[in-house]
């Protein structure tokens, strides 16, 4: 007998039929004697619908009121699933985040979980009930409803699993696991049996949308055994996110390729090459809450230098405007940009022990005539910024070059 937290995403609870299917799966585990805590998202599309509704009333709604509205989607699904379980003769009790008392800070729409009181849940589990908890929401110290950011139900699931010391946290979604890359771009992409937390964290931050990044951080920190599975398949082990690399297995050097289409590049030309210049350029950009990713400062000549960086495409116009505002003050000659950039990243803990990974990546891209405009690296990742029109080609050739289409033996 195990204590299992299962989280189901929006498509898995997208209509009454699917909710009944979730109930059947939960019933199966319950019948095997497991104690079950279920965390749900809102029906697919519902949170978007609620946000759109709010926007019809107010262009910039108060974040507190927005959370009151957008947290309702999950309240519907938890009630419906509990009813479906009771219809099958299984005792079930639903709880909103506030009822569990998932305590968060008060940053509405992107709150962080501070503490979870597991008492209600334990009492119900001990009485033989299935506990159904609304994902994505909590309550602050003052009793206000908060939400955890888009995709936040994953984080609810993992945080609950940590709080009640569950044996496993299973994330059920519309894919059957974590893939070497997006199968829509590379049909040969393979499902991974395991991936390490570090790799998953990089994949999530680089644009692989399987798990909310905060949930992965949480799982790594509290050593929650985390598994991603399909809610539309009866069988299958999904992908296990592991704390440690499996020392007994021959690890592939690269585990996956992540990419992001929505990048843009900005270059500030002919800035004086002197201390403080990076701060003068990036300070105002950061103050406007624009995230800067890759940064390059070229070697100076004649006392001036060029400075380039990437931002998310939706922030491009804002960033350009800010820089035009400070251009004279900085003494820059010109500001240029390219809003159609993409980022491709290879990720793998095997990079630590295998030299030559970067050169293989660069050679592979060169052979296809793909120009690398920027590079950034971490211990287990290499990212390049390229013209968006080469994105799919780049992902395909890298996938092949690193042998990801072949199952490891
Ligand atoms: N319903 C919320 C969203 O769409 C939370 C979630 O599904 O994880 O972002
Ligand atoms: Mg999700």
Image (cartoon, grey):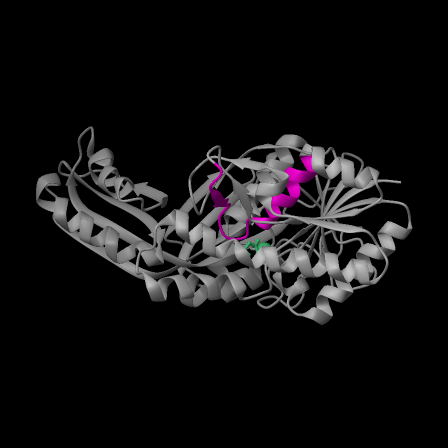
Q: Quadrant of the N terminus?
A: top right
The answer to whether residue 161 is magenta is: yes
Q: Is residue 224 visible?
A: no
Q: Nearer the viewer, residue 384 or 261?
A: 261
Q: Is residue 94 above or below residue 50?
A: above
At a point 34% along the width and 64% down the height, the residue shown is 57
Q: Nearer the viewer, residue 150 or 373?
A: 150
Left or right of residue 175, residue 393 in this image: left
Res. 33 image quadrant: top right
Q: How many marks?
A: 0
The answer to whether residue 129 is magenta is: no
Q: Spot the residue most to the right.
A: 32
Q: Is residue 10 visible?
A: yes
Q: Is residue 119 above or below residue 136?
A: above
Horizontal and vertical percent for residue 243? 69, 35
The quarter of the image that holds ligand 2 is bottom right
Horizontal and vertical percent for residue 393? 51, 66
Left or right of residue 153, residue 295 in this image: left
Left or right of residue 172, residue 236 in this image: right
Res. 86 image quadrant: bottom right
Horizontal and vertical percent for residue 205? 51, 47
Per the rendered image, the range of residues in magenta is: 143-162
Horizontal and vertical percent for residue 383? 47, 48
Res. 100 image quadrant: top right
Q: Spot the residue most to the top.
A: 275
At a point 49% along the width and 44% down the height, the residue shown is 145
Q: Nearer the viewer, residue 37 or 262?
A: 37
């Amino acid at each position: 007998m195990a204590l299992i937290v299962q989280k189901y995403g929006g498509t898995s609870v997208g209509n009454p039929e699917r909710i009944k299917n979730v109930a059947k799966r939960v019933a199966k585990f319950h019948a095997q004697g497991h104690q079950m805590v279920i965390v749900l998202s809102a029906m697919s599309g519902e949170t978007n619908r609620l946000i759109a509704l709010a926007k019809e009333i107010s262009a910039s709604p108060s974040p507190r009121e927005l959370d009151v509205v957008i947290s309702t989607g999950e309240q519907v699904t938890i009630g419906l699933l509990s009813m479906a379980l009771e219809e099958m003769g299984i005792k079930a009790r639903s709880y909103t985040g506030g009822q569990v008392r998932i305590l968060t800070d008060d940053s509405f729409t992107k709150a962080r979980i501070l503490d979870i009181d597991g008492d209600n849940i334990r009492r119900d589990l001990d009485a033989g009930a299935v506990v159904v908890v609304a994902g994505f929401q909590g309550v602050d110290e003052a009793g206000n409803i908060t939400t955890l950011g888009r995709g936040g139900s994953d984080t609810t699931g993992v945080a609950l699993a940590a709080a009640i010391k569950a044996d496993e946290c299973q994330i059920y979604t519309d894919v059957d696991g974590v893939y070497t890359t997006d199968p829509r771009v590379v049909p040969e992409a393979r499902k991974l049996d395991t991936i390490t937390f570090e790799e998953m964290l990089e994949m999530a931050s680089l644009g692989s949308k399987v798990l909310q990044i905060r949930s992965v951080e949480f799982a790594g920190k509290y050593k929650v055994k985390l598994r991603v599975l399909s809610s539309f398949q009866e069988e299958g082990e999904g992908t296990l996110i592991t704390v440690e690399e499996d020392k007994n297995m021959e690890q592939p050097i690269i585990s996956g390729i992540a990419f992001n289409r929505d990048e843009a590049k900005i270059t500030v030309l002919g800035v004086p090459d002197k201390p403080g210049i990076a701060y003068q350029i990036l300070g105002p950009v950061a103050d406007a809450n624009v995230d800067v990713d890759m940064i390059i400062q070229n070697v100076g000549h004649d006392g001036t230098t060029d400075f380039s960086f990437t931002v998310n495409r939706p922030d491009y116009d804002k960033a350009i405007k800010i820089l035009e505002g400070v251009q004279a003050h900085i003494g820059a000659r010109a500001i240029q940009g390219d809003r159609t950039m993409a980022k491709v990243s290879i990720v793998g803990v095997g990079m630590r022990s295998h030299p030559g990974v970067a050169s293989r990546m660069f050679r592979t891209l060169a052979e296809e005539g793909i120009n690398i405009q920027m590079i950034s690296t971490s211990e287990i990742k290499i990212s390049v910024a390229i013209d968006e029109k080469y994105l799919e080609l780049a992902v395909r050739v890298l996938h092949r070059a690193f042998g990801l289409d072949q199952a490891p033996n």
